[in-house]
Image: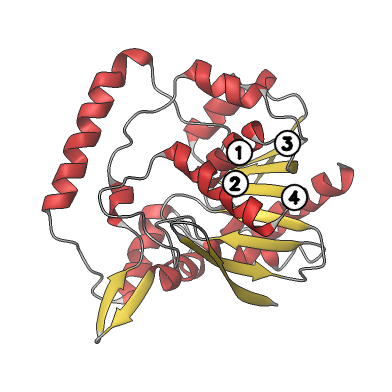
Amino acid sequence: MQHNLEFSLSNIVLRGIGYGDPNKPMILALHGWLDNAASFNPLSEYLNDFYIVALDLVGHGLSSHRSDGAHYHLIDFPYDLHELVESQGWQSFILMGHSMGGIIATIYASCFPEYVSQLISIESFGPMTKDTQSSPTQLRESILSRLKAQRSAAKHPKSIERTIEARAMVGDINLESAKLLITRNIREENHELFFTTDRRLRTFSSLRMTESQAEAFMRNIQCPTLVITGTNGYQSMRTALNNRLDWVKNLSMVECEGFHHLHMDNPQPVADEIARFLNDN
């Protein structure tokens, strides 16, 4: 059972999908970069003891875009999340994120530990970082990429089928998983197709955190934490996990068969590990 969700906040509207029975324990689920709430559809079929509130993060799926002149800074996503939490009166919930959603979930759990009972991070383990000396170059490249995007015309999909095939090829995901994502990321208007995802998301980040900043966030996580990696997932995630093992107090780690989107392509083993972790904690 699934239903559409809509949350009106002060400056944006967040939309999403509710999977399951709202009377069951809630998992608040955050998708990866350029994905959307539908990425948790496959997992939901195997997590029947929980109610999954899967969000379209701002700029993604069916949610609002940031206003003209604004940008998508990583540290603004936890702000959106907490405004939502306060608006709904949620007191304690399970927080789950994939890739970029896992980074956002990690930062949120660190800043607001009293709200997060358990944290699940799929193919993600804390913020991506760069050294301090690269800061001028990072900001320069970000500004140039934003100006370039602003001056260039938006590209529109030619067909849903071709876009699904391209997404599957680029993202190392199967066609069914790609179809779930693309269907929610495309709208049709006057017989033309348009991406719903804000193209400003594709520009370079202004500044990445330093490793010491990432450490400070991760050491402040109070709740039991599960990290799930894919056997063929991103090497950068595996490296981060190996380098940061002692930063999170109550950490469990598992590996499941699959690529970066293993929660979509191979959902049952991932769901089994999630259920086991939540039942044990």
Q: Position of residue 107 (x, y in %)?
A: 58, 35
Q: Position of residue 227 (x, y in %)?
A: 67, 38
Mark 3 and mark 2 lie on one chain; the one further toward the N terminus is 2
Q: Is residue 15 above or below residue 81?
A: below
Horizontal and vertical percent position of residue 22: 76, 68
Which comes sooner in the sequence, label 1 or label 2?
A: 2
**Residue 225: numbered disc:** 3
Question: Which of pointers 3 and 4 lies earlier in the amino acid sequence?
Answer: 4
User: What kind of element bears circle 3?
Assistant: strand
Closer to viewer: mark 4 or mark 2: 2
> What residue would you read off at disc 2?
82
Q: Which residue is mark 4?
A: 93
Judged from this view, the residue extending furthest toward the top is 133
In front: label 3 or label 2 = 2
* Crowding near the residue tagged with mark 2, few <14, some 14–19, many ≥20 C-alpha atoms within 10 Å: some
- Please name which of the two marks, 3 or 4, marks the residue nearer to the observer: 4
Left or right of 10? Residue 271 is right
- The image shows residue 23, relative to residue 119, as above or below, that is below
Q: Which mark is residue 108?
A: 1
Q: Are marks 1 and 2 in contact (CB under 8 Å)?
A: yes
Across and down, in percent, residue 217 comes to 59, 25
Q: Residues within 10 Å of mark 3 (few under 14, many from 20)?
A: many
Tell me which numbered mark, 4 or 2, is placed earlier along the sequence: 2
Q: Could you tell me how far apart the alpha carbons at marks 4 and 2 are, in whole angstroms?
A: 12 Å
Q: Is tag 4's residue or tag 1's residue first in the polypeptide sequence?
A: 4
Assign a secondary structure to mark 4: strand
Q: SS class of the residue under badge 2?
A: helix
